[in-house]
Image (cartoon, rainbow, N blue to C red):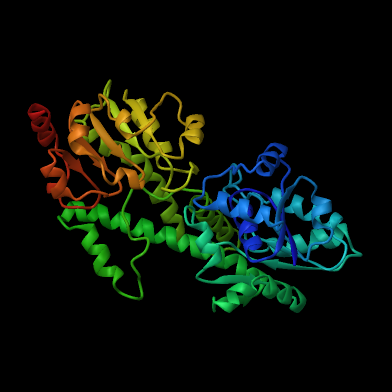
């Protein structure tokens, strides 16, 4: 089979490479000549573990190619996937569908025989119907089908998610389109992956419902973490105690500075707007959006408190700036709220991220970027651990104390054991644990005097 993947961003590139691993002949198309040129040279424009090897393997096998020519790429395709961006629209929070609809019109002009046009991008309910209308209006002579096939890829583990997914969702009203999609996903039928066949509207809503539910779960445990700090409970034990309930599950019950990334922020907001437009508001999700925005902004206050209530002129060593480890994605990362807030209070920021520095430099002016963890700690009054990269989980605290002015760690991801940190001689603060694990100004003064 032959497919064209329109868009070589995160979703398009990963999906295209993985389909080619299934044995499908894939052409990934983009308007960005520089990006296509880089891909044809074997350079991967995004950070995703294992993607460079997968792309190189399938390019060498002749199953994967990259092109600027959309018309030529879709002419003989059995299916064309739309995997372009759907960012939040300025002003109202709705998903911006201009790229989706523009791609649909171009696809319509290029297809010849029967083709299934599939929305892989995350799109609101009704988008598939509009794509069909655009194609029909542009090419009333051509036979085509329309399907929705939302992606459920986690950055940092996207290849495994595609090749061994929890489920595949396919929405279409056409038996012929359904047969094409079944053929494309045949390797997953062989490993008995659940395939959910449904309508266009249902498939589109499944994607948004999944992401907003996970965002709600994250926000719930963050709120519980705040309560734990007040009553003297441990959020990790609470999370374990409720996560062992099969109806709840243990995933996404990790407290932290709030969710970010390319999906949850824009998808929660888009679903809120869609629900309001249809007169069926989602009050829970509206609250989740509000709480998460405020949480990210409040995290800077924890760091200021750990510095004795004043960071003016003090150096803060920030470890990790991407919204999660194993990605270079900075979109809606908590660091984009935390670091500017600290700078506004006079802090000097030194930072290191294993993959995100190139993107972060454009978004976080005034930061001194360092080449490794320990360079970042030189002269620092406090470590602020914002992203739980593996290399930050095994810090040499003896070396860290020698480099720092004061041995203070604010761990917003609860990477470390509080008792171990006390033995290491660090004043330690974390999220959602009893007060004995959080710094008071008195504790800090005593640690400074000891240092």
- Residue 391's quadrant in the figure? top left
In screen coordinates, is 20 left or right of 375?
right
Which of the two residues, 450 or 124, is positioned nearer the viewer here? 450
Which of the two residues, 398 or 60, is positioned nearer the viewer here? 60
Q: Is residue 174 above or below residue 17?
A: below
Q: Quadrant of the N terminus?
A: bottom right
- Specify the farthest residue to the top: 313
Residue 270 image position (x, y, % from top left): 56, 54
In screen coordinates, is 241 left or right of 330?
left
In screen coordinates, is 267 left or right of 284?
right
- Specify the farthest residue to the front: 60
Question: For the point 43% across and 58% down, which residue is it?
Answer: 215
Q: Quadrant of the C terminus?
A: top left
Residue 218 image position (x, y, % from top left): 37, 57
Q: Is residue 314 above or below residue 152?
A: above
* Residue 281 seen in the current view: no
* Residue 230 seen in the current view: yes
Residue 242 image position (x, y, % from top left): 28, 69
Q: How many marks?
A: 0
Residue 67 image position (x, y, % from top left): 75, 47
In screen coordinates, is 363 left or right of 85?
left
Which of the two residues, 318 or 200, is positioned nearer the viewer here? 318
Question: For the point 53% across and 59% down, which residue is it?
Answer: 159
């Amino acid at each position: 089979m032959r497919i064209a993947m329109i868009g070589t961003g995160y979703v398009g590139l990963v999906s295209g490479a993985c389909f080619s691993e299934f044995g499908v002949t894939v052409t990934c198309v983009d308007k960005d000549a520089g990006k296509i040129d880089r891909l044809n040279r074997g350079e991967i424009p995004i950070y995703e573990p294992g993607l460079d090897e997968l792309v190189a393997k399938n390019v060498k096998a002749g199953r994967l190619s990259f092109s600027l020519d959309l018309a030529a790429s879709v002419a003989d395709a059995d299916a064309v996937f739309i995997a372009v961006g759907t960012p939040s629209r300025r002003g109202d929070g709705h998903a911006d569908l201009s790229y989706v609809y523009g791609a649909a019109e171009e696809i319509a002009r290029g297809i010849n025989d029967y083709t299934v046009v599939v929305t892989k991008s995350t799109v609101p309910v009704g988008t598939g119907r509009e794509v069909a209308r655009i194609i029909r209006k542009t090419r009333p002579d051509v036979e085509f089908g329309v399907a929705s096939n939302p992606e459920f890829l986690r950055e940092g583990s996207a290849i495994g998610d595609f090749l061994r997914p929890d489920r595949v969702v396919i929405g279409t009203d056409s038996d012929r389109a359904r047969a094409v999609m079944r053929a494309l996903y045949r390797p997953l039928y062989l490993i008995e992956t659940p395939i959910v066949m449904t309508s266009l509207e249902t498939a589109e809503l499944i994607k948004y419902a999944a992401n907003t539910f996970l965002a709600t779960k994250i926000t719930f445990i963050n709120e519980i973490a705040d309560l734990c700090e007040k009553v003297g409970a441990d959020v990790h034990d609470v999370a374990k105690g409720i996560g062992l309930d099969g109806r709840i599950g243990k995933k996404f019950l990790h407290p932290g500075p709030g969710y970010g990334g390319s999906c949850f922020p824009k998808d929660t907001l888009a679903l809120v707007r869609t629900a309001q437009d249809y007169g069926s508001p989602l009050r829970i999700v509206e609250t989740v959006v509000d709480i998460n925005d405020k949480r990210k902004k409040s995290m800077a206050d924890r760091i200021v408190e750990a510095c004795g209530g004043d960071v003016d002129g003090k150096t803060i060593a920030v470890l990790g700036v991407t919204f999660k480890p194993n990605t270079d994605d900075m979109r809606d990362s908590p660091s984009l709220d935390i670091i500017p807030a600290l700078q506004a209070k006079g802090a000097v920021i030194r930072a290191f991220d294993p993959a995100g520095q190139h993107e972060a430099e454009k978004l976080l002016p005034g930061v001194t970027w360092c080449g490794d963890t320990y360079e970042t700690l030189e002269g620092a009054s406090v470590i602020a651990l914002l992203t739980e990269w593996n290399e930050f989980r095994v810090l040499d605290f003896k070396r860290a104390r020698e480099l720092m002015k004061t041995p203070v760690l604010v761990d917003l991801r609860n990477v470390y054991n509080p008792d171990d940190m006390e033995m290491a001689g660090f004043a330690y603060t974390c999220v959602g644990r009893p007060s004995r694990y959080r710094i008071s100004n008195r504790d800090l003064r005593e640690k400074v005097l000891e240092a």
